[in-house]
Amino acid sequence: MQSPLDTPLLIATANPHKLEEIGAIFATRRVSVEGLDALDLSIDEPVEDRCDFEGNARLKAAYYARATGRICLADDSGLEVDALGGEPGVISARYAGARGPRARVDLANNAKMVERLRDVPEDQRTARFVCVMVLADAARTWAQVRGTVEGRILLEPRGTNGFGYDPHFFLPELGRTTAELEPEHKNRISHRADACQRMLDALKRLGIGRPCET
């Protein structure tokens, strides 16, 4: 296994929103990270064909570890809506089949979800965000964690922060959607925050990561 202090921890994503969230949370424990865009490499995306978040996260972590020769942290995350039988689930990012800029894809995904839930009473629109993180090198998986946050789906979007399904994901105990939370607040209570904290505990046990510059 590579020396834990050689490089920042590689996060297997080119999604700037996801990298920003993970980086902000990891920075609280002085762990430095970088995304795939920081590498001078052209790597095709893997086919995420597993049936659950755990399988896809393991697939991505191993794939990018082999492609880069680095220890790699990958996550697979999405939304599970109970009234939709757990959809969109592992296809959350491509639920509507739209292509193009991320903002356009997000709007299409949300529109499809809202349309399918339009006749479902709000108290039956229970849902959760799920984030599974896997740390791996080319030979083995070093850690796997799962984070969740429970809520309900609103038909009308609220808030301008966050991305994806955030404007429709309502947290009853806070009276706000995750898109109405300041990033610092979201980074304390989100599914990704939950998974990150669990992964940070695993990193500490493994001695992996690089202290950020002071």
Image (tube, rainbow, N blue to C red):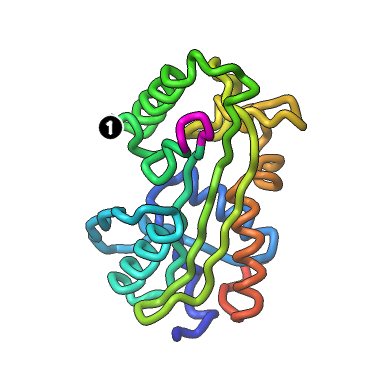
Q: Residue at x 57, y 63 (%)?
A: 145
Viewer-side residue, 195 vs 212: 195
Q: Residue at x 58, y 26 (%)?
A: 125
Q: Magenta region, mostly helix, strand or loop? A: helix
In reply to whether residue 83 is colored magenta, the answer given is: yes
Image: magenta residue range? 81-85
Residue 31 on image: x %, y % = 61, 66
Viewer-side residue, 22 vs 139: 139
Viewer-side residue, 51 vs 13: 51
Q: Residue at x 60, y 53 (%)?
A: 147
Residue 159 on image: x %, y % = 60, 23
Compared with 1, 119 (above or below) is above
Residue 134 on image: x %, y % = 48, 65
Which residue is under mark 1?
97
Count of numbered circles on the image: 1
In the rendered image, the quadrant that contains the N terminus is bottom left
Compared with 133, 176 (above or below) is above
- Disc 1 packing (10 Å; few <14; some 14–19; many ≥20): few
Amino acid type assigned to the residue bearing label 1 in the image = Gly
Q: Along the horizontal axis of the image, is 93 left or right of 186?
A: left
Residue 214 on image: x %, y % = 68, 65
SS at mark 1 in the image? loop
Q: Residue at x 57, y 35 (%)?
A: 127
Compared with 39, 140 (above or below) is below
Q: Along the horizontal axis of the image, is 154 left or right of 186?
A: left
In reply to whether residue 106 is colored magenta, the answer given is: no
